Amino acid sequence: MIKEALVGNIAFSKADAIVQGIAPDEDFSEGVALAVSQKHPGIIEDFAQFRAAAPPLPGSLWAWRNGAGPRVVSLFIRAAAPDHHGKARVEWVDQALAQLRELALRENFRSLALPKIGTGAGDLDWRDVKPLIQKHLGDLPAKVFLYTIFNPLIAGVEE
């Protein structure tokens, strides 16, 4: 089940997993990545260590957890770029969402929260991304909370 049109800061989500779309050279300086890093500051150092061990491939994911908090699942859907503003590709979103589906089933997530991945800094059209979310996550046994409007000050109503 996908609950769409949530308004709020996804970093405040109570879901088992918070999903974000990033680049392999993410600097966590804006958008969802900034909000997540402000709520979970340890992700920045851990991501630097992960990235140093092996450069992430487009279409893959990295799942991170800080103690008992939610999993933060980073989907590598954007290209690396000197200004950290690399663009996303629909095929990378498709591949990463397929991996997210596998992770959600393997980890028995009861709920996931995700933004309109790839449509902000990634510069993709929502009409191309939304069907991929439906394709990969629409029939999961988990609740999927789709945050469509970012408001840094409030939590979305996840019911």
Image: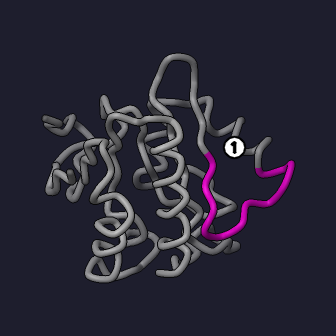
Dot 1: within a 10 Å radius of its alpha carbon, few (fewer than 14), some, or many (20 or more) residues?
A: some
Residue 98 among magenta residues: no
Mark 1 lies on residue = 47
Per the rendered image, the range of residues in magenta is 51-62
- Residue 119, quarter of the rendered image: bottom left
- Residue situated furthest right in the rendering: 53
Residue toward you, 145 or 48: 145
Q: Residue at x 75, y 45 (%)?
A: 48
Residue at point 55%, 70% (across, down): 95
Q: Is residue 51 above or below residue 67?
A: below
23 horizontally vs 97: left or right? right
> Relative to residue 48, is residue 84 drawn left or right?
left
Q: Height in image: 79 above or below 20? A: below
Please name the colour scheme applied to the rendered image: one colour
145 vs 149, nearest the viewer? 145
Q: Residue furthest top?
A: 68
Compared with residue 129, is residue 52 higher up or lower down, i.e. above or below? above
Residue 61, how many percent across, how many down?
Answer: 61, 55
Give how far across and how far down residue 75 sits, in percent: 54, 58
Q: Quadrant of the C terminus?
A: top left
Along the viewing direction, whichever of 96 and 106 lies nearer the viewer: 106
Front in this rendered view, residue 36 or 108: 108
Where does the image place residue 140, in percent across and percent down from the top left?
33, 50
Residue at 39% across, 64% down: 136
Q: Residue at x 48, y 73 (%)?
A: 94
Q: Disc 1 on helix, strand or loop?
A: helix
Q: Position of residue 26 (x, y in %)?
A: 62, 57
Q: Amino acid at mark 1?
A: Phe
